[in-house]
Amino acid sequence: MSVLPNLDTGGERCGDTIDVVTSDEAMFADAMLASYRRAIASVASVSGDIRKAALRLAAVWRAGGRLVYVGAGSSGLAAAEDAAELPGTFGLDQSRIAIVLPGGTTEPFRIDGAAEDDAAAGERSIAELGDLSRDAVIAVSASGSTPFTVAAAAEARRRGAFVIGVAHRPVSPLLVIADASILLESGEEALRGSTRLAAGAAQKAALGMLSSLMGLELGHIHQGLMVNLKADNAKLRERARGIVAAIADVSDAKAAAALREAGGDVKPAVLIACGIPNMSEAEGWLAVAGGRIDDALRRARIHGSKGEGPNKGA
């Protein structure tokens, strides 16, 4: 498949950057801050689109599909960063998350500008993932016309993936290809053409909202807390203890004991700290509640009072 997108990454200059004297630090700083404000405003204007896309991602994950992040250059780094955080933040299975960058992920912080223009490499990288009919692809490109990313998105859609496109130009090739489009009209950069700045800030905010709203839908956020985090170091083990103590309203010692009983898993530990007698029953109530702590507790209190276990009265 041949993809020949418009490679223009220029754009109209915004009024508050036209007369910036770059040697004047205060003026340039103000121009940068103004561009960052526009970037965040651009995310706010499409929050509805982000919410809809997040619900689709949650459905894909529940059905056993994969999440595939695609990008090149600074957009690729933003995509890779969001993808890399998901196992630790939400306890998602690393084997079901893929990152597709030009040249692969062995040197993710080495940006090869020429590789961004290799549409064939984008197609090959996606083809290597095989059948994508159960999967979702999140493709990010500031211009919406990066050959590697556009070709990858097109190939992913051909293979049956649900494609989410994130770009900063309307009617760009990526957004035309995508099943769900997130248009971030963040405007001109104060440092003209450096899309790692305002555009990068908008991308990070949009991707963070997208994956976090997915986490919320999956039941991995409760009361603004990461209840499915992977506590694999001392800092996160301490955070897990604090989360259990806060949600269950128990002492640190009781929270720690519940976590030991639950093998370090926060969700069942919360239920144990709230009075569920053991790990097996806690896991059972979570299963019938779709992983949601509040619903699991409600079901346990209602049906437990009737002497029913988690596999009855669900």
Image (cartoon, rainbow, N blue to C red):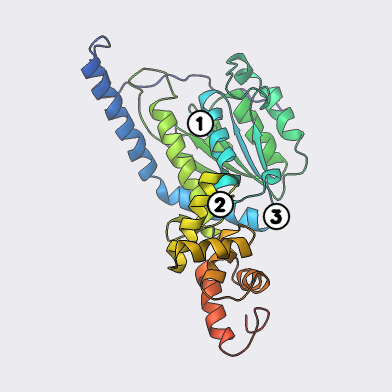
Amino acid at dot 1: Ser
Q: Residue at x 70, y 24 (%)?
A: 121
What is the residue that sits farthest to the top in this orientation?
23
The kind of secondary structure element at disc 2 is: loop
Amino acid at dot 3: Gly
Decide which of tag 3 and tag 2 comes sooner along the chain.
3
Decide which of tag 2 and tag 1 comes sooner along the chain.
1
Residue occupied by mark 1: 172
Residue 38 in the image: above or below residue 63: above
Amino acid at dot 2: Leu
Q: Is residue 312 left or right of residue 217?
A: right
Residue 246 in the image: above or below residue 181: below
Neighbour tally class for label 3: few under 14, some 14-19, many 20 plus, Cα within 10 Å: few
Residue occupied by mark 3: 64
What is the residue that sits farthest to the front in this orientation?
253
Q: Are marks 3 and 1 in contact (CB under 8 Å)?
A: no
Q: Residue at x 64, y 53 (%)?
A: 60
